[in-house]
Amino acid sequence: MAKIDVRYILTTIASFILAFIVGGIVMIVSDAEVASKFSYFFGRPMDAISASWDKVSSAYSALAIGAVGSWPAITESTAQAAPLICAGLGVGLAFRAGLFNIGAQGQAIVGAILGAYVGFSFHGLPMVVHLTLGVVVGIVGGAVWGGIAGWLKAYTGAHEVIVTIMLNYIASGMLAWLLTTTVFQRPGRTDPISQVVDWSATMPRLEGTRLHLGFFLALLAAVAVWWLLDHTPLGFRIRAVGANPDASATAGMSVPRTTVWTMVIAGALAGLAGIQYA
């Protein structure tokens, strides 16, 4: 039985606590009325403390109620979280290989473009076929977009941060242009809005809620990434290259090939995120 590393759990908890602390500080500093009370903090410290507490506690209370305060709120949170989980997995996986995948946005856009095209171009297909085709095409699109950055990094030495940022702009520009073409633009409209995706290519939802299949795909993707990193030879190579690429090369691992495959998989995960926005 695999042992649970307590350090990872503590690191995760500490990250949440630190995020809440930093968020609270930002709220206090950005509120002129609350910040003004610190000008006489040493004379009447409770004024500043009380105002700060009221500001932060009310904000986080509203956050909790809006996110998990009711069943509709919970399902809305799952709908918003699903693409973020997928994109985050793409960024995190690349990071394990020592790569900074700043291009999840562009990879998601390409996935959304291709998924939407499949969704509004093919008609009369069964939902299982239509939705599966759209998801697969979107994942492949994101994988190709990520693979471009990986190949340039591996075989030309181009820095992945610069390349992925540039690819983000290219993807955004391509989307803006496509929405002005007759292929993508909705008939009868002059504004940049796409055609309507057939219902058979959309993520099925639990009736009356925002909970849809994409959230479960995101959870499945998280499990798949864990399995990849901890239980496959490729995952071992990804972790090894991320820890020490020179030692990995000396041990016989192909650092360029591992780099490319890492970015391909990272792009595929981001493409899955884009599908949920299509």
Image (cartoon, rainbow, N blue to C red):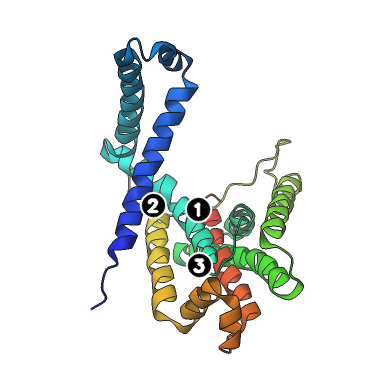
Select label 3 or label 2 by which is in front: 3
What kind of residue is marked 3? Arg
Image quadrant assignment for residue 242:
bottom right
What kind of residue is marked 1? Gln
- Where residue 231 sits in the image (x, y, percent)? 39, 79
Q: Is residue 229 left or right of residue 113?
A: left
Tell me which residue sits at (45%, 17%) in the image: 35
- Where residue 273 sits in the image (x, y, percent)? 51, 56
Q: Earlier in the sequence, mark 1 or mark 3?
A: 3
Q: Residue furthest front?
A: 42
Task: Between residue 271 and residue 13, name the one nearer to us.
Answer: 13
Question: Mark 1 and mark 3: span between their CA atoms?
Answer: 25 Å
Helix, strand or loop at mark 3 = helix
- Where residue 260 sits in the image (x, y, percent)? 63, 74
- Say if 132 sits above or below 44 in the image: below
What kind of residue is marked 2? His
In the picture, the quarter occupied by the N terminus is bottom left
Q: Which residue is mark 2?
A: 212
Tell me which residue sits at (49%, 23%) in the image: 30
Question: Mark 2 and mark 1: span between their CA atoms?
Answer: 10 Å
Q: Which residue is mark 1?
A: 276
Q: Do the residues bearing badges 2 and 1 touch, measured as CB atoms within 8 Å?
A: yes
Q: Residues within 10 Å of mark 1 (few under 14, many from 20)?
A: many
Helix, strand or loop at mark 2 = loop
Image quadrant assignment for residue 25:
top left
Question: Mark 3 and mark 2: span between their CA atoms?
Answer: 29 Å
Q: Earlier in the sequence, mark 3 or mark 2?
A: 3
Question: Which label number is shown at residue 96?
Answer: 3
Tell me which residue sits at (32%, 50%) in the image: 13
Select label 1 or label 3 by which is in front: 3
Tell me which residue sits at (35%, 21%) in the image: 52
Examine the rendering and report whether any part of residue 124 can be seen.
no
